[in-house]
């Protein structure tokens, strides 16, 4: 991406913006935009592109929106090529964190082994979903059943391998897991009332089993018998003319020889009916049955129980029954189960080696943490917590936070750490995720345009400079381009001095119809520039505070020229008598090599100031440093004129003149209702103008950051007083 061509129309308040960016000589631009001009709208438009969303005008949604963002060959910039760094997003977590955790060679070997394991796992899980009735979370449900943890499928299946592979038949493979282990049913089965009723039922059932001619409690009941009958039939036992003998408990009865499956099933069925149809057992079930009519879910479960009475005794111990169900399902799919475990065991040794190697790898993940720990000033350090688990168990990458103080170190959870951090320190964690995102894109050789939106807001100076240095690192990658947006002039000037060429530093101007981005002024000392352009009337007047400061530093505050310039910043007895020729003489005295000649030397400077201020009201919204200083001077002079004309006390004021005159006005007119609006306007003059006038070469950023519109509105309001 060597060039970027932008054409925006009606995008979040940007009526029109056309701009080409040329990245051939340098990949970074910095744009200074006063508050409310276009910065947030510009970033949001690019954010939409990165998310695959359409942009619009929120206030006038019916207006046609155009968003054309193209490269030098005319192709559209894709969403993958854009990343917007917001000022702060507490919920942002880079999705690319895990890609940095293991080097590509290890990841490739791991994926190759795991592909075969996953194929066998998917075949098994497909059948288990059918048997259990579960649509989702089958793997997690199995893991929790056998290990009480998620993501432990391998361990769970391996734990019951002996039970699954023995010769017994699956007793409950026809039972639906979903019908029993759902929230409504489980809540009922865990109630004290149900537990008492099921105890009564099981007690009676056990008594009947013990009294049965052929069944024996815990060894051979009707469920076991049915399974055995099926197994003998499936294995051709009776077809081979074999027979079995049933030994009755009643020793007076002779052994019962069985020759066919039908005979065996008949004996089992008669014995089962004798038990299940027993009046006492039926009464015990009836007591349970009455509890199962509370709502539809329980009535559905009741119907399911009536068709599967064999599971009633198992409901006494739900955890045990849960495991028996899964073992039965595994048994019914024994081939798929054994194939899966076989493939897993074949690859496990190699996987373990990869995990161990991964834990010792000096990955990009570590380098990100090192960047953060070394550069950012926060009361904690970062370490990796689960590098191996991210691969083996597919865990989300996790960072450990070690809090430091003079008495030692302690590891803390992120939630607890956040409660102890300042807002700036919390923002540092956001920067950590940005670094992960940048590093991952670097690792993937992903060409990216970063739109950086006032990233240093609310940071202390040390961390602010750490961010600037990291932005400089980004600028040095040949795959990366940056457009850095800010309304903070100090930050703007700093990135220019560190790594953004002067020609790539831009400023925003806003008219009623469009937003324009032009080359920046004032990055270097504006006063030096003004002094060689005093033929510009606005620069001439705006430089008065600066020249007055020079006289103060080189002479003193009693100097006649200092006092005369003071009379152009405050209304004094001689303010109306100072002429442009007087101003010319002062400048030539302070700067002997200047040879300044001003036209209309007989004109009063104070009238000249007011005339120029009026022209500022129609200027475009932009930096306009001289306009802002000029408006501030004119506003204060107008306010003081108004006060002195209204108040009874017109005596000279020494020090903090505007404030003291305002106090006089409030004392005399504070109780007058007709003057309340005037008092509000004068309060604004006191709040906004002092710093805008009494500034110097080291402190002119605040006035630049102030919106033109505020000063225009205030001057217009004071003119009406």
Image (cartoon, rainbow, N blue to C red):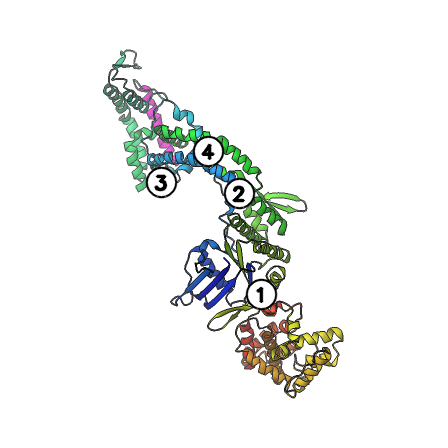
Image point (55%, 45%), residue name? 365
Of marks 4 and 3, the one in the foreground: 3
Of marks 4 and 2, the one in the foreground: 2
Number of other residues with Cα within 10 Å of mark 2, as a class: few under 14, some 14 to 19, many 20 or more:
many
In the picture of the structure, the residue carrying the numbered disc 2 is 101
Of marks 1 and 3, the one in the foreground: 1
> In the image, which residues are magenta?
188-212
In the picture of the structure, the residue carrying the numbered disc 4 is 147
Number of other residues with Cα within 10 Å of mark 1, as a class: few under 14, some 14 to 19, many 20 or more:
few
Q: Marks 3 and 2, Cα distance to the nearest angstrom?
A: 32 Å
In the picture of the structure, the residue carrying the numbered disc 1 is 503
Q: Marks 4 and 2, Cα distance to the nearest angstrom?
A: 27 Å
Measuring from the top left, give residue 494's x and y in whole percent: 62, 62
- Quadrant housing the C terminus: bottom right
In the picture of the structure, the residue carrying the numbered disc 3 is 135
Q: In the rendered structure, are the residues bearing label 4 and label 3 in contact, judged by CB atoms less than 8 Å apart?
A: no
Is residue 682 inside the magenta stretch? Answer: no
| Image side of residue 458 versus residue 125, left or right | right
Measuring from the top left, give residue 476's x and y in whole percent: 58, 54
Q: Nearer the viewer, residue 114 or 245?
A: 114
């Amino acid at each position: 991406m060597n060039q970027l061509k932008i054409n925006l129309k009606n995008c979040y308040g940007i009526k029109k913006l056309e701009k080409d960016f040329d990245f051939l000589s340098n990949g970074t631009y910095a744009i200074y935009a006063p508050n409310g001009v276009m910065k947030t709208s510009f970033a949001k438009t690019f954010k939409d592109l990165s998310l695959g969303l359409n942009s619009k005008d929120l206030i006038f949604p019916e207006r046609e929106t155009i968003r054309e963002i193209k490269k030098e060959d005319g192709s559209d910039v894709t969403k993958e090529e854009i990343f917007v760094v917001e000022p702060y997003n507490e919920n942002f977590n880079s999705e690319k964190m895990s890609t940095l955790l293991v080097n590509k060679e290890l990841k490739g070997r791991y994926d190759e082994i795991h592909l075969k394991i996953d194929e066998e796992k998917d075949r098994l899980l497909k059948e288990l979903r059918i048997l259990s009735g579960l649509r989702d979370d089958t793997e997690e449900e199995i893991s929790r059943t056998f290990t009480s943890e998620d993501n432990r499928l391998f361990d769970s299946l391996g734990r019951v391998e002996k039970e699954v592979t023995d010769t017994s038949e699956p007793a409950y493979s026809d039972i639906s897991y979903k019908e029993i282990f759902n929230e409504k049913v489980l809540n009922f089965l865990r109630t004290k009332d149900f537990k008492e009723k099921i105890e009564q039922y099981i007690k009676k059932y056990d008594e009947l089993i013990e009294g049965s001619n052929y069944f024996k409690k815990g060894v051979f009941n009707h469920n076991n018998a049915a399974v055995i009958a099926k197994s003998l039939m499936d294995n051709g036992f009776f077809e081979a003319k074999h027979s079995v003998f049933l030994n009755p408990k009643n020793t007076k009865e002779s052994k019962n020889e069985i020759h066919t499956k039908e005979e065996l099933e008949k004996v089992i069925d008669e014995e089962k009916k004798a038990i299940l149809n027993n009046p006492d057992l039926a009464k015990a079930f009836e007591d349970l049955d009455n509890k199962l009519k509370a709502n539809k879910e329980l009535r559905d479960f009741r119907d399911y129980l009536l068709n599967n009475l064999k599971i009633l005794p198992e409901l006494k111990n739900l955890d045990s029954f849960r495991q028996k169900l899964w073992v039965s399902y595994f048994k019914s799919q024994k081939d798929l189960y054994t194939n899966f475990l076989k493939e897993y065991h074949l690859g496990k040794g190699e996987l373990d080696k990869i995990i161990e190697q991964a834990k010792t790898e000096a990955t990009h993940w570590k380098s990100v943490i090192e960047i953060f720990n070394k550069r950012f000033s926060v009361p904690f350090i970062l370490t990796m917590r689960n590098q191996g688990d991210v691969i083996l168990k597919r865990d989300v990458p996790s960072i450990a936070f070690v809090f430091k103080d003079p008495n030692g170190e302690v590891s803390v959870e992120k939630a607890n750490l956040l409660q102890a951090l300042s807002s700036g320190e919390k923002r540092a964690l956001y920067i950590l995720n940005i670094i992960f995102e940048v590093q991952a894109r670097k690792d993937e050789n992903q060409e990216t345009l970063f739109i950086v939106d006032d990233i240093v807001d609310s940071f202390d100076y040390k961390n602010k400079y750490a961010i600037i240095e990291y932005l400089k690192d980004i600028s040095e990658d040949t795959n990366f381009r940056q457009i850095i947006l800010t309304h903070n002039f100090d930050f703007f000037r700093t990135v220019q001095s560190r790594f953004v060429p002067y020609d790539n530093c831009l400023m925003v101007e806003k008219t009623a119809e469009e937003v324009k981005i032009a080359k920046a002024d004032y990055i270097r000392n504006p006063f030096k520039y003004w002094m060689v352009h005093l033929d510009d009337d606005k620069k001439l007047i705006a430089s008065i505070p600066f020249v007055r400061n020079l006289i103060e530093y080189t002479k003193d505050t009693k100097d006649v020229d200092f006092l005369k310039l003071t009379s152009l910043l405050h209304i004094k007895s001689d303010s109306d008598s100072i002429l442009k020729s007087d101003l010319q003489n002062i400048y030539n005295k302070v700067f002997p090599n200047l040879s300044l000649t001003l036209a209309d030397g007989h004109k009063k400077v104070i009238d000249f100031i007011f005339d120029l201020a009026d022209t500022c009201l129609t200027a475009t919204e932009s930096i306009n440093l001289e306009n802002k200083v000029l408006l501030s001077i004119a506003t204060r002079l107008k306010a003081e004129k108004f006060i002195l004309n209204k108040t009874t006390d017109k005596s000279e004021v020494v020090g903090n003149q505007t404030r003291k005159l305002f106090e006089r006005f409030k004392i005399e007119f504070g109780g007058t209702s007709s003057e309340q609006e005037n008092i509000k306007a004068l309060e604004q003059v006191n709040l906004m103008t002092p710093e805008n006038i009494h500034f110097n070469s080291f402190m002119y950023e605040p006035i630049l950051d102030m919106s033109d519109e505020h000063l225009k509105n205030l001057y217009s309001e004071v003119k009406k007083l």
